Image (cartoon, grey):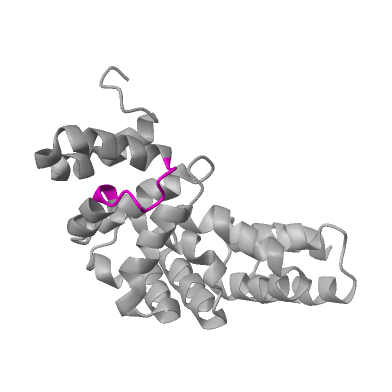
Amino acid sequence: DPQKTLANPGALPTQQEAALQQLDANPPKDYDKQLRRVLFQPGYVQAIREQAFDRLQRRDLKQLKETLQVSLPKLDALAWREWLCERIAKEGWTDLTPTLVRAWSVPFPGWKDRDDDRPERLALIAMHGQDHLVDVVLDLLVNADPIKEQNLRLRCWELLQRHGQRERLVALVADSSVKPDDALLGGLRAIAQMISYEMPLIVSTLPVVMLTGSLSLVD
C-alpha cells in the first residue's frame, strides 16, 4: 500500500520514493495532506522531503506556502531549514518575507555561527538586497496588522534592536506622522512627550508593552 509506506517515516527512502511515484499516477484525495506531513514530520530523509516539496509546489502552491508560514519558524532541522530558505529565495516568494523574519528572530537551538549567517537572513538579502534589509524589517513593524500580527511586530522590534538599529526605532517613535492612528505607537509617543529625555528607555521597554498589550505598570 503506497499510502501506508509514505505515511511511515521509518520506511526505506527507496520505498517512499516508489510510493510517491505510484501515488502520482493515481493521487488519493488526501495526497496533498500526506505531502505536507512529509515536509515537517520527523523521521523523513531530506531527499524525500525535497520530492514532496516539489510535488506540493506543482499541485497546490497556496497550501505549500501556508504550511511554510506555520512550520518554518518552529523547524529544528538545520539542513532542511537552510534548504527551504534557499528555495524560497530562489523562487522569489517575497510574500513569505514575514515568515522568514519570524524564523530569523527566534533563537535556533545549537546555532553557533554569527547571527548574520542565519539562513533566513541570507534568504531575505537574496530577495530584497542587503542595503534594504533593515527597511524591510522596519516596514513590517510599521505596517503589520496591530492585532493579528502583534507577535510579528515584536519580532521585528527585537531584530532591529539586536542589530544596532535603536536610532531608527527612536526616530520611528518620535515621528508622529508615521501611523498616527496606531494605538501602540501613539501610546509610546504620549509617554515620550512627558519624559522625552528617556526615549531610549521607551524603545527598550516596547517588547514588554507589546507582550502585555498595555502601557500600565500594574499589568
Q: Residue at x 37, y 34 (%)?
A: 211
Image: 126 above or below 205: below
User: Residue 108 sits in which quadrant?
Assistant: bottom left
Residue sitting nearer the eye, 39 or 139: 139
The extreme front residue here reads 177
Residue sitting nearer the eye, 63 or 148: 148
Q: Is residue 128 visible?
A: yes
Q: Which stretch is magenta?
A: 173-182
Membership of 184 in magenta stretch: no
Image: 200 above or below 12: above
Q: Is residue 190 left or right of residue 99?
A: left
The extreme left residue here reads 197
User: Residue 141 sits in which quadrant?
Assistant: bottom left
Membership of 178 in magenta stretch: yes
Q: Residue at x 67, y 60 (%)?
A: 36
Residue sitting nearer the eye, 189 or 60: 189
Q: Residue at x 50, y 59 (%)?
A: 72
Q: Residue at x 41, y 37 (%)?
A: 183
Magenta stretch, main secondary structure class: loop
Image: 214 above or below 177: above
The extreme right residue here reads 26
| Image quarter hosting the N terminus | bottom right
Q: Is residue 15 visible?
A: no
Q: Is residue 155 left or right of residue 45?
A: left
